[in-house]
Amino acid sequence: MHKIALAVLVILSSLTSAQAGNAKNPGKSIFQENCVFCHGDDGSGKTPPGIALGAHNLTSREVSKKSDTELAQTISQGRNKMPSFSNKLNDSQIHELILYIRTLEKKE
């Protein structure tokens, strides 16, 4: 019985840590809810849907050179096969998302 209680505590602790991490970085939660399907956890775009749709690699130099304004415009209006998120995300959420995307960039 003690092993079960310990396992439950470990699981709850893990969930609480993950939730706290997302609370500290709301952009990560937004990314996971809206972007991971195509861009993947690492932002590379190497998921089956991402490959099929030509999702950009968010860690690339091409993306890292874009200004926040350019990224916000792409997220808001969509581009090529990427849908618009203007009806789903507000300006603040888009800003948080961009901050998170910047953490995915390759450091060269």
Image: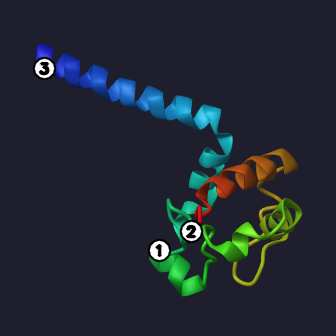
Going by the numbered disc 2, the residue's amino acid type is His
- Residue at 29% over, 20% down: 9
- Residue at 62% over, 32% down: 23
- The secondary element bearing badge 1 is classed as loop
- The secondary element bearing badge 3 is classed as helix
Residue under label 3, please give it: 3
Residue 39 shows which numbered tag? 2
How packed mark 3 is, by other alpha carbons closer than 10 Å (few <14, some 14-19, many 20 or more), is: few
Q: For the residues marked 2 and 1, what is the alpha-carbon distance in whole angstroms?
A: 7 Å
Pointer 2 with pointer 1, Cβ within 8 A: yes
Residue 29 shows which numbered tag? none
x and y, in percent, of residue 7 in the image: 22, 25
Of all residues, the one furthest to the top in this rendering is 2
x and y, in percent, of residue 43 in the image: 56, 65
Residue under label 1, please give it: 47
Q: Is residue 28 above or below residue 80?
A: above
Going by the numbered disc 3, the residue's amino acid type is Lys
Q: Earlier in the sequence, mark 3 or mark 1?
A: 3
Q: Is residue 41 above or below residue 56?
A: above
Q: Earlier in the sequence, mark 3 or mark 2?
A: 3
Pointer 3 with pointer 1, Cβ within 8 A: no
Q: For the residues marked 3 and 2, what is the alpha-carbon distance in whole angstroms?
A: 39 Å
Going by the numbered disc 1, the residue's amino acid type is Thr
